[in-house]
Image (tube, rainbow, N blue to C red):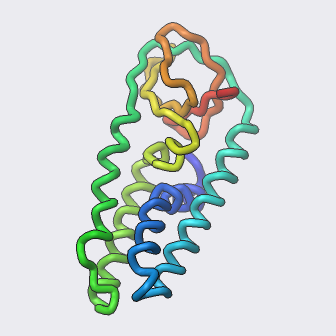
């Protein structure tokens, strides 16, 4: 599993579209909040791009894929949090602002501790798809690939990004 700092950066990147929505929503009335949202989003995107570049450099090994299940649709559950900016949050209210920050911290802790780094809309924007696969050892893993389809029985070169996460090399 990537280091905790990297997982937090990936968490931030997963919410970059939400930060853009906040920035648009609050640009006229609460410019400070909008600028902070943009800065956090930029930090997240830079972190994701750096991580992806480094992950591609990892040594790969060939794994036979025995079972495959697309998990791309699971990212839709993530969409629920994108409703937050449309719940008339009073950013002038200190209590509402603190509550919003606490919500993001709770989401971050869940994301980081649950190894959910593959639920990231930016990965989808970058062309990645998520599959739950198992190899010869029968352990389920998530695999990030730019393929739209993975066939059982294929031998695929993957880099191990964590205990339960593979990145297909060359995709």
Q: Residue at x 41, y 55 (%)?
A: 111
Residue at the outermost left position: 87
Q: Image check: 99 left or right of 105?
A: left
In front of the other: 79 or 99: 79
Give coordinates of residue 27: x percent, y percent: 46, 81
Give coordinates of residue 5: x percent, y percent: 58, 61
Give coordinates of residue 14: x percent, y percent: 48, 55
Give coordinates of residue 156: x percent, y percent: 61, 18
Q: Residue at x 40, y 49 (%)?
A: 114
* In the depicted structure, whether residue 57 falls above or below residue 157: below
Q: Image check: 10 left or right of 92?
A: right
* In the depicted structure, whether residue 95 falls above or below residue 81: below
Count how many numbered circles sit on residues in the image. 0
* In the depicted structure, whether residue 90 falls above or below residue 165: below
Q: Residue at x 60, y 39 (%)?
A: 161
Residue at the outermost top position: 153
- Image quarter hosting the N terminus: top right
Q: Residue at x 40, y 88 (%)?
A: 29
- Image quarter hosting the C terminus: top right
Q: Quadrant of residue 85?
A: bottom left
């Amino acid at each position: 599993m990537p280091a905790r700092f990297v997982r937090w950066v990936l968490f931030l990147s997963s919410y970059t579209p939400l930060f853009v929505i906040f920035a648009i929503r609050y640009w006229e009335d609460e410019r400070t909040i909008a600028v902070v949202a943009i800065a956090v989003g930029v930090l997240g995107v830079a972190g994701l791009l750096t991580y992806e570049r480094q992950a591609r450099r990892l040594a790969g090994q060939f794994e036979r894929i025995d079972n495959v299940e697309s998990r791309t649709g699971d990212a839709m559950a993530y969409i629920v949090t994108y409703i937050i900016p449309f719940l008339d949050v009073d950013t002038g209210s200190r209590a509402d602002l603190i509550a919003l920050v606490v919500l993001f911290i709770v989401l971050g802790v869940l994301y980081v501790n649950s190894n959910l780094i593959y639920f990231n809309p930016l990965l989808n924007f970058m062309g990645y798809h998520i599959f739950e696969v198992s190899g010869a050892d029968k352990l389920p893993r998530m695999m990030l690939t730019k393929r739209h389809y993975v066939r059982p029985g294929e031998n695929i070169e993957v880099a191990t990004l964590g205990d339960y996460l593979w990145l297909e090399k060359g995709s």
